[in-house]
Image (cartoon, helix red, strand yellow):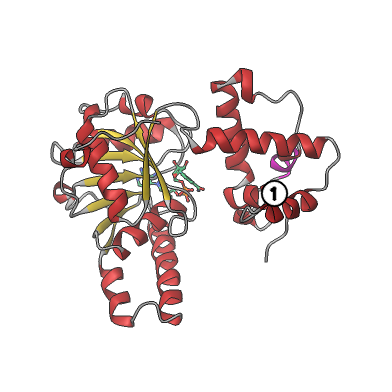
Amino acid sequence: LKKTAKGFEKKAGKVEQAAVLGAGIMGGGIAYQSALKGTPIIMKDINQAGIDLGLNEAKKLLTKRVDRKRMDAAKMGDVLNAVKPTLSYGDFETVDVVVEAVVENVKVKHAVLAEVEKQVKPGTVLTSNTSTISITTLAEALERPEDFCGMHFFNPVHMMPLVEVIRGEKSSEKAIATTVKYAKQMGKTPVVVNDCPGFLVNRVLFPYFGGFAALLRDGADFQQVDKVMERFGWPMGPAYLMDVVGIDTGVHAEGVMAEGFPDRMKRDFKSALDVMFENERYGQKNNIGFYKYE
Ligand code: NAD
């Protein structure tokens, strides 16, 4: 974790037009939040179904705001107009910041980043919302790695205030400062962190999940553990949180953390999470995890 130096924000470029690649859970949320807070955004996906999902999610969230009288219908129209869905790279030369939020796969991300770099003007800041891939590794696909850094949002994007801005080996101060500025424009709290497995939040969170897995092995009841942690003051317990994150995502991230920090994060037993993953109980995304959802 690095403190940002005085005058750091002066190094930021303008952020008047953004773009997000991938209109999934995260991309749709990022587009909605950017538009809501006044930065127009192009939302690109490779299939129309993805775009429709992203837009429907944005409409659902905005309708809720209108119903709760936190927004009028005209403003809702303005926000929706500020999200430009597309299947092509048209207009990318006007973009100041790009957030890549496609599937969590190094090869796909390398291809997408190399492709978008050719579409934007030099100086456009490229970022990745990856949860588990090294920013320095992703930068290997780029001709201008200095214009690239991590911008890690949390799910659901509209509710979670924190954004990790990750400094890769070659990220410039301008790229970091511009990303910090964009996060603030979106109403978020950015924190600048170094590139390592789990960045900052998951390095804290995964030992907690590891402790939870050990409790289950020792015979604890997950619902009781959830209740205890809620009474302790957390908004939700570890089982419910895992269901929100996705058991598949959790197991994958656990593997990355264990590889990165074998001395601290490697489990020497098969956990309830592994068993649930094998049984395709992925959490809220397929309506069954620790709990059942309708
Ligand atoms: P998702 O599967 O919901 O969405 C991915 C989208 O990317 C899909 O709509 C897909 O069509 C699209 N896509 C695939 N290839 C593309 C390409 N070449 N160009 C444009 N679009 C393409 O995934 P998600 O959960 O939104 O995750 C996206 C990224 O965000 C991943 O890197 C993930 O690790 C990260 N992330 C996810 C979460 C989470 O809780 N879901 C939290 C933080 C970060």
Image coordinates for residue 36, horizontal then vertical, percent? 32, 65
Secondary structure of the residue carrying tag 1 is helix
Is residue 223 placed above or below 111 in the rendered structure? below
Quarter of the picture holding the N terminus: top left
Residue at 37% in and 49% down: 189
Instruction: Say whether residue 274 is visible.
Output: no
Quarter of the picture holding the C terminus: bottom right
Q: Is residue 294 magenta?
A: no
Q: Find disc 1 in the rendering and name its residue.
A: 239
Image coordinates for residue 287, horizontal then vertical, percent? 66, 58
Image coordinates for residue 150, horizontal then vertical, percent? 35, 36
Is residue 72 placed above or below 225 in the rendered structure? below
Residue 216's quadrant in the figure?
top right
* Total marks in image: 1
Residue at 37% in and 29% down: 135
Image coordinates for residue 183, horizontal then vertical, percent? 32, 49
Check the image and name the residue furthest to the right.
219
Horizontally, residue 174 falls left or right of residue 47, namely left
Amino acid type, callout 1: Ala
Which residue is at the front of the view, 285 or 196? 196
Q: Which residues are magenta?
A: 275-279
Horizontally, residue 78 falls left or right of residue 27, namely left
Is residue 281 placed above or below 217 in the rendered structure? below
